[in-house]
Amino acid sequence: MNYYLGKPRQNKKKRILILLLALFLSVSVSYMVFSRFQAQKETFQPAQETMKSESEPLDRPVIGLVTPLSGPFKREGEFFRQGAELAWKELQSQGVHGDLTVLDSGKEDAETIRSVEEFLSNPKSAVLMTHLPMTVLSKIIPDCERRGIILVAPAGSHENLVDKPRVVSFIPSDSSEGRYAALVAGDLSDGKKTAILFDPSPYGEILLQGFRKGANSKMLDFQEIPCKTDDPSLQKTIAEKLHPETSLVVLAGSPLWGTVVADILAEQDYKGRLLLPQSYERMPLEDLSEHFAGRLYVLKPVVIKESGNTALENFQKAFVQAYWKRPNELALLAYDAVCWVGSPLKEGILSKEELWDRLRKGTNAGAPYQGVSGKIFFDTEGRIQRPMVVTIYRDGKFVPAPDREG
């Protein structure tokens, strides 16, 4: 075989291979550019679709309900669900069209977020009712904002819920609660000295800041004492700094922290009153009542009174008839929240934008929403306000203190 005759044939093969390789690279680059263009196009598309979907009328809006129906918080999640479902059934009997979708948040957070994202992707989803920790809410809120969905956290007091677009809580925020504490402090102290003992933590600092604002507006003179429970000299600090004529101590911190501080006050034979935030429930209060019987005052956004409120009595009767048990405050808040959201829907078919507009403009200081749990309204800054009730913890119950409402 002649070597030189065979050589050109190999070069021809190489040229063909090079051409094929070049063609492959060209197609690959074109595909990558096209894919990138499509990805960019899809990135911008949801915003356009969101703007369009917000203004589109919803013949059957979907209300989502996310609450723990399994796990350690199943009991309170059931109360939340039952209060909401009772309100929804009443709305349907009044001609409201739509659907209520219930999601269980009692499992892993990641699973809850996935199920919520699936709900939010439904173009007919208009409102999301939640009873969730802030760690989960913080991951859900941005998607709600992007899709124009109203998020209602009836029992959410976390400060991070304040000033979020279309995010509504039915109870005061932590800073608002601190302000309410200052507004009633002068009355509870009988004009004598007031002190606020606070935990230098984010929660304690927020309560303190609100208290300062309220005290400034009332020209209330008070004493501030930071209390770190891990400080071995805390007992000495309280003994030296707390004025002996103090008749009211406001505790600004978590129940676990407050129990430690209150025990020190009891050991030092403090004879005045304690004013506690709404986060203090029956378990820590039972421990404190041994030393402060008749002197434990707690701020509460909702109190189920025994009588005197016909609407509340009717709600209680309906709840007992439906579920064979008495409702708690959480069921009451969920009921009111669903009734509030459903009120504009009685007028007919609305878009998400129209629904929010009517809720926002129709709930103000001049025309508050009157629920069975009390009045709520948006203030001039667009924040929900609700007067808090000063209660005395007595015999395992929160009893409204006479003529003491903020």
Image: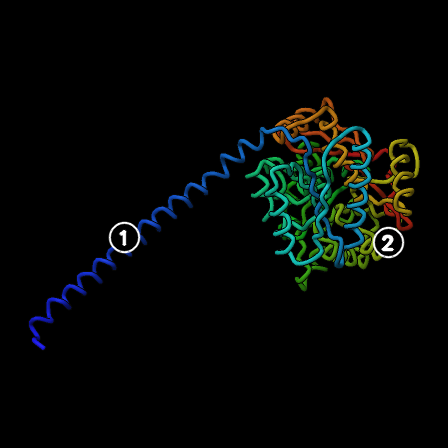
On screen, residue 74 versus residue 217, left or right, reads right
- Residue 67, compared with residue 383, is above or below; it is below
Question: What colouring does the structure picture have?
Answer: rainbow
Say which amino acid is labelled 1: Ser
Which residue of the protein is positioned furthest toward the top in this rendering?
366
- Residue 385, compared with residue 138, is above or below; it is above
Q: Mark 2 vs mark 1: which is more N-terminal?
A: 1
| Rendered location of residue 182, percent (x, y) | 72, 38
**Quadrant in the picture for residue 390:** top right
The numbered disc on residue 145 is none
| Rendered location of residue 60, percent (x, y) | 69, 33
- Residue 181, compared with residue 253, is above or below; it is above
The foreground one among 380 and 243 is 380
Say which amino acid is labelled 2: Ser
Tag 2 secondary structure: helix
The foreground one among 9 and 291 is 9
Which residue of the protein is positioned furthest toward the front in this rendering?
1
Which residue of the protein is positioned furthest toward the bottom in this rendering?
1
| Rendered location of residue 373, percent (x, y) | 81, 36
The C terminus sits in image quarter: top right
**Mark 1 — residue?**
26
Look at 89% across and 32% down and name the residue there. Answer: 309
Look at 85% across and 33% down and name the residue there. Answer: 403
Question: Does residue 221 appear in this view?
Answer: no
The numbered disc on residue 289 is 2
The residue carrying pointer 1 sits among few (fewer than 14), some (14 to 19) or many (20 or more) residues within 10 Å by Cα, namely: few
**Quadrant in the picture for residue 266:** bottom right
